[in-house]
Image: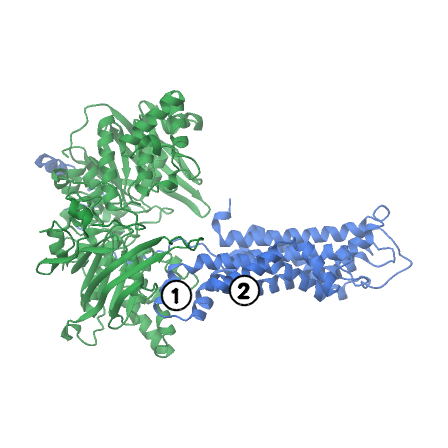
Chain colours: A green, B blue
Amino acid sequence: MTYAKPIADTVLDVRDLHTQFFTETGVVKAVNGVSFTLGRGERMAIVGESGSGKSAMAMSLISLLAHPGKLVSGEVWLDGQDLAAMSEKELNGIRGSRVGTIFQDPMSSLDPVMKVSDQMVPPIERHLKLGAKAARDLAIGWLDKVGIPDAARRIDAYPFEMSGGMRQRVMIAMALSCNPRLVIADEPTTALDVTIQAQIVELLRRLTAETGTAMLFITHDLGLVSRFAQKVAVMYAGRIVEIGPTATVFRRPKHPYTQSLLRTIPRAGETEKRERLLQIPGFPPDMKVPPQGCAFRERCPGAHDLCAVETPQQTVRGPDHNAACFLPNGLDDVAEPAAEAPAERPVPVTTDWRALPRQDVLEINNLSKHFVGETLLPWVKPPTVRAVNGVSLRVRRGETLGIVGESGCGKSTIARMLLGLDEPTGGEIFIQGTGQMVFQDPYSSFNPKMKVFDIIAEPLVVQRVGTKDERARRVRALIEQVGLEQSYLDRFPNQLSGGQRQRVAVARALALNPSVVVADEPTSALDVSVRAQIINLLCDLKADLGVSFVFISHDLSTVRYVSDWIAVMYLGEVVEYGPAEEVFADPAHPYTRALLDAVPVLDPEAEAEREIRVISGELPSPLNLPKGCAFASRCPKVTDLCRQEKPVLVQRRERRTEACHHAG
Amino acid sequence: MAGSLSLGRSAPVTLRRANEGPMRPTSPAPPPATQVRKPPVHRTGWRAILANRKTQIALMILVPILVLAALLPWLPLQAPLQTNLRAMMKPPSLTFPFGTDRMGRDVLSRTLEGVKVSLFVGFSVAFISLVFGVVLGTVSGFFGKWVDRAIMTVVDIFLAFPSLLLAIGLVSIVGTGLIPVIMAISLADIPRFVRLQRSLVLSLRTRAYIDAARTVKAPQWWLLTRHVVPNTIAPLLVAASIAAANAILVEASLSFLGLGIMPPEPSLGNLIRDGQTYLEQAWWISTLPGVVILAIAISLHFLSDGIREVLDPRSRK
């Protein structure tokens, strides 16, 4: 994907955009002077942490701000018209016809009680001035283009009759159907699985190239940027701090924030396992009180006296490449690159766990879980969801097992069974010692009425461990161990940030000295910079305490970084198992290979050269599993044997097993 | 890319003004701990409830009425039950601010006495329904299965009747008077609380923090008293203040129909009934107690709105 400046005209020209939210507790200055241009057929990504103003900026372009938000000043020129100065009525003519939008959640952006045709056809009639029949034909044509099978029939389906990926395709078809000049996509693939995400991204890339539609693409996934966007703008505290061609920005970032961001992400194969991830200290600034000087100053290792006084403006750093920092090369100019002072951690090692025998602490044999539905008629066989189908795994002391797979593959069900939250239908689980859990969503995993102290102490109180004083001492030791100050013990969960909550969750999980900690997507709800902190913490604890981890995630690069062993699951079964590095470097099962192909890497040039084999189709329903190999419906190597006979896990090489007729 | 590098070097910015000489980093990144900033917290405590505009309006109406009712024996008013044949059907004046009825009794002091009865009924009903609703609803929602089915069947049968009709029916069985009235209205209100609590518990039952407590083998009573019930109290308080307003109106209706508090004992309902016959000659006998009922009911609704706004910021417009 070599970048060439578009010869054609500029489609969008945004000048000094300011957006503010007038809330009861003060004015939130979400966007503070954003300017950029977008050419015909150009795809630009906007990246930044949550709260950096990227969504507010995009929605300001078409004045679609939620209630207290207001476009305060600025110009938005689209084909010689200033959208910012338009009346609501004029804007309604623009939205949906000249500007298309794709939102994050395909579940809530389609009306559930209207057929797809009723949502899609009227806008086409209105904007393109077509008759009902012609508009319908056009809509069917678009649905066909976005890869909806049997579009002529499916156009009369209701949204709930479609999967998430299908709905997002419908959204894309709707956004593009009126030949817009510009498409704004706000995290269009975040809610989707990696393989579906890869399909959607391919689709968007092909369609915008065909139609010459410019695209503004908001995301927090830097890998996706490198695969998809020609141009990238990094936002921080409501400003664009760096903007330029993706390849240049990723190769030679000039702003300290971009530089740090790129280094917080474990790079497949590049980042050494034992090397700690860079973490950006501190928090983004409070947008109600915009800081004087550079907003990133407090988190920047290269901060300078001037940064506190004057706000740096964008200056030219290369062809089309601008950055807003006083240092010409950002952190590269700082003599001592961000000394990664690993925070002093109290290491309460009572016995050196390394001296203990490296035995299995967790053993799962032929585990299965079937959810049986209900039928009203006794002679009808109740529908059965086979969520987990005969899984056997082992975890040794002090090792991490990563479990990966798309949603619906049964990985969370395994976690719930490990902790006794669900009864297995069959099979056995042996845990030496106790197992504890770190949950996915740090916002719902704490009782909002309990203070942090009581949250961490709960396991001790329930299990009647020690006296009150002993428990209090233990809680204080635990909170320090996860890198928080004791003053946090008096807070309620809603007074903590996402990363702090996840630290508290880890402290609580460690309270009973577990031998295994099950972490179900512990970082997926966190921002990139915070994610690195939690991953570092988990790795430290593993090294200090010899705790074993079962790390469940769909984020393959994170799993690769933290895991010693890896199990790839598909429809309730393990299809490949082996040492993490070996599996990632040389996947044996076609599904593992497909998953790895679907994940974009951080290097735009490597992305451009990569031959991306996107697997087609979606997960079959676990209600009626196919007779042969479960992956047969999507597998590129499928043969008749696969459809007839179910492959079993076979060891072909040392320490590696996979369930495929055609592997090896 | 070499070109871009040299371009980058030529670009450094106006530095001379702030300090001369080569650029040196200041002290590296400040320790993050000192930067700790609490994310905005939506306050939900009692103080926040008292700071709410609607709650304040409610209290501005309720508190004076309550104070007057409490101070009744010391006010320079004729006792509620005392008759005065020299001052029958007198219109409102300084001596009788609400006027007098056909037996020369002071309408204001009778109204305040009635307010006591009304509020006692209102709050007793709210409290009794709350307690029973919490217990039955929690059991029903948390344990499910046959317990749930049994409780909900009974509740649904009760809910099939309009609550006023149910209360009338119950009073005609149990008899009239203060305690029977409270029992009757509570019995009619409990099913609604059970339903509400059950739905709250059902949504809480699958929260991650309940699962988290389960993984450390917390017993059922711990889950219920620590995690489930405390998180249902807020919406229940809203429901309870509406139930109190409703109970006051139902009590007034029952007394008006001659099924509630029996004369000469005053209640807002039977005061209105008393004056109804003389509405053309002496409007004040019915109207002024009616206005007081209205004020109390409205302020209780404001109170519940206020509590809800504080507890659920999204309901605010």
Left or right of A597, for residue B290: right
Secondary element at tag 2:
helix
Label 2: chain letter: B
Q: Which mark is residue B136?
A: 2
User: Please, is residue B225 above or below residue A126 in the view?
Assistant: below
Instruction: Specify few, some or many for label 2: CA neighbours under 10 Å numbering under 14, 14-19, or 20 or more.
Output: many
* Residue A598 shows up from this direction: yes
Of tags 2 and 1, which is closer to the observer? Answer: 2
- The residue at 31%/39% (across/down) is A166
Q: Quadrant of residue B280?
A: top right
User: Please, is residue A16 above or below residue B47 in the view?
Assistant: above
Q: Nearer the viewer, residue A398 or A449?
A: A398
Q: Which mark is residue A490?
A: 1
Q: Position of residue A455 (x, y in %)?
A: 37, 66
Q: Position of residue A407 (x, y in %)?
A: 28, 50
Q: Quadrant of residue A467?
A: bottom left
Left or right of B53, for residue A322: left
Q: Quadrant of residue A344?
A: bottom left
> What's the residue type where badge 1 is placed?
Asp
